Image (cartoon, rainbow, N blue to C red):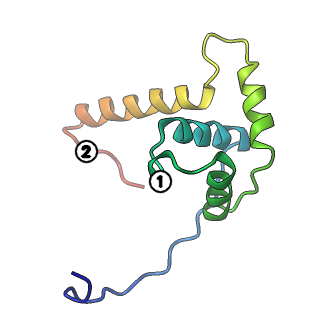
Amino acid sequence: MQGLLPALPVRPAKKLRWTGRATDLVELLYALDTYGCINDGEIGIEELADAFSEILGIEIKNCYNVYMNMKHRKDDSRTYFLDDLREKMNKRMVESDLKGGKYKKR
C-alpha cells in the first residue's frame, strides 16, 4: 500500500502547551494508563509522562507521589479533574443538542 498514495505535504505541528495544573495532567495520565488505551496498555506511566511532557511542553515530576496524594483525597470522588472533564463534556453535548448539533468553534 505504501507508495500507492501521493505524499501529502506535512504542516508543522502547532506548538502545544499544557495550561492546566500539573496534578490534573498526572490524573489524566493515570486514567489513560488504567484504561490501557495507549499502545494497548503496554507502556509504563513514566514513559507515558515523558511523552506527554514532550508534546505539551511541561515537565512532569514525581508522578507516583502525585498519584499517592490523589489517593489520600478525602472527598467521595478522588478524581477531581476527570469528574470536571466529564461534567463539562456532557454540558457541551447538551448545549450542542439545544443548538441543533452545532457548537461554537474556537
Residue 90: x %, y % from top left: 38, 29
How packed is label 2: few (under 14 Cα within 10 Å), some, or many (20 or more)? few
Residue 97: x %, y % from top left: 24, 33
Residue type at numbered disc 2? Lys
Name which quarter of the figure residue 25 lies in: top right
Q: Locate residue 80 relative to residue 68 in the image: left or right.
A: left
Q: Which mark is residue 60?
A: none
Q: Residue furthest front?
A: 42
Which image quarter holds the C terminus? bottom left
Foreground residue among 30 and 81: 30
Residue at 72% from the left image edge and 57% from the top image edge: 58
Residue at 72% from the left image edge and 22% from the top image edge: 71
Identify whether 57 is placed above or below 12: above
Residue at 44% from the left image edge and 48% from the top image edge: 40
Name which quarter of the figure residue 73 lies in: top right
Q: Locate residue 30 relative to residue 40 in the image: left or right.
A: right
Residue 16: x %, y % from top left: 58, 63
**Residue on which disc 2 sits:** 102
Work out how far the residue at label 1 is from the one at label 2, CA to CA, in angstroms.
33 Å
Name which quarter of the figure residue 23 lies in: top right
Residue at 26% from the left image edge and 84% from the top image edge: 2
Local SS, label 2: loop
Identify whether 98 is placed above or below 17: above
**Residue on which disc 1 sits:** 39
